[in-house]
Image (cartoon, rainbow, N blue to C red):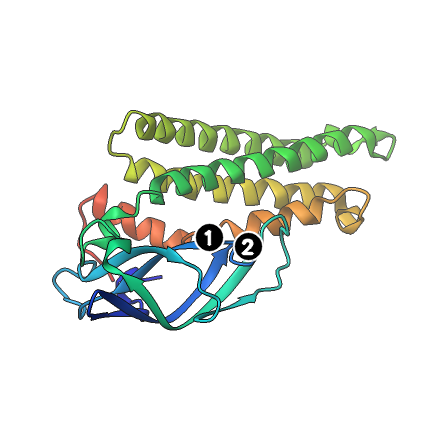
């Protein structure tokens, strides 16, 4: 997603702003009473595309905000929603930071990417433990299937990848806690955690064979959850774009 091209707009009026637009994949909107809302307050400048957006912290006025829950294949612990905003009035005192510099005041991007990376690691580790247990218990041709290198080596490779992703995420978390720059490390943690987690779940599915779809094991449930992390909160391709420009100093391709 290109945040600089958001279409939600806030128009200045006497004493405040009027906001119109749409948002998607908003968590906990079924229960929330407040919203942190980013809206464009001036036209997009190609030279500084992230300027001209303003951050607001305001009430969820359900007379002006329609909330529609999105049915999901994955977790149900928290709701995800679409928001339709029509004529939402907010005051000048509800602006966070400076008008036109709202993107600079979003402080949760790096921490979110670190958490998502570790989420992928955790899901992958759970799947790997299930696969190893099954590899010891499932006997074919008078030997446990985990004794076969075709099974064992793929799981060992996943263990190595998960451990690498975990260490990268913990390094990023350490930098974040020390208030140091960690954008590159946080992006790498998200990328590695998502990849390693999904690969581990996929290999656990293969290890279980047909039983991967049995409710008794719930391997498919982990696989489905891990797949989401390749897309959220940003795609793997956008992570690579970021690393390309920030770590390697190569020309921007988008």
Residue 121 point in image, percent of width and height = 53, 35
Q: Is residue 237 above or below residue 135?
A: below
Residue positioned most to the left: 47
Q: Quadrant of the N terminus?
A: bottom left
Numbered-mark total: 2
Q: Secondary structure at mark 1?
A: loop
Taking the image as shown, residue 78 lies to the left or right of residue 25, namely: right
Residue 150 point in image, percent of width and height = 67, 37
Contact (Cβ within 8 Å) of mark 1 with mark 2 = no
Label 1 belongs to which residue?
232
> Picture quarter containing residue 186?
top left
Tell me which residue sits at (38%, 38%) in the image: 111
Cα gap from disc 1 to disc 2, whole angstroms: 22 Å
Q: Nearer the viewer, residue 58 or 223?
A: 58
Q: Secondary structure at mark 2?
A: loop
| Disc 1 residue crowd, few under 14, some 14–19, many 20+, Cα 10 Å | some
Tell me which residue sits at (17%, 70%) in the image: 43
| Disc 2 residue crowd, few under 14, some 14–19, many 20+, Cα 10 Å | few
Q: Nearer the viewer, residue 93 or 241?
A: 93
Q: Is residue 41 above or below residue 236?
A: below
Label 2 belongs to which residue?
31
């Amino acid at each position: 997603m290109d945040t600089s091209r958001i279409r939600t707009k806030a128009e200045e009026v006497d004493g405040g702003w009027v906001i119109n637009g749409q948002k998607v994949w908003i968590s906990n909107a079924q229960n929330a009473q407040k919203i942190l809302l980013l809206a464009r307050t001036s036209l997009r400048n190609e030279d500084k595309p992230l300027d001209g957006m303003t951050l607001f912290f305001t009430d969820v006025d359900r007379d002006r905000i329609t909330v529609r829950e999105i049915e999901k294949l994955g977790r149900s612990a928290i709701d995800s929603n679409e928001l339709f905003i029509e004529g939402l009035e907010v005051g000048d005192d509800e602006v966070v930071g400076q008008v036109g510099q709202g993107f600079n005041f979003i402080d949760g991007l790096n921490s979110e990417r670190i958490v998502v990376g570790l989420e992928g690691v955790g899901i992958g580790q759970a799947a790997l433990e299930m696969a190893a247990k099954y590899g010891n218990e499932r006997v074919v041709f008078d030997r446990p299937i985990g004794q076969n290198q075709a099974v064992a080596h793929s799981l060992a490779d996943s263990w190595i990848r998960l451990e690498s992703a975990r260490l990268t995420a913990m390094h990023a978390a350490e930098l974040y806690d020390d208030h140091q720059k960690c954008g590159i490390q946080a992006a790498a943690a998200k990328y590695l955690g998502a990849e390693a987690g999904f690969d581990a779940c996929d290999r656990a599915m293969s290890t279980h064979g047909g039983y991967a779809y049995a409710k008794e094991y719930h391997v498919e449930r982990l696989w489905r959850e891990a797949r989401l992390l390749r897309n959220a909160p940003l795609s793997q391709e956008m992570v690579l774009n970021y690393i390309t420009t920030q770590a390697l100093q190569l020309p921007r391709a988008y």
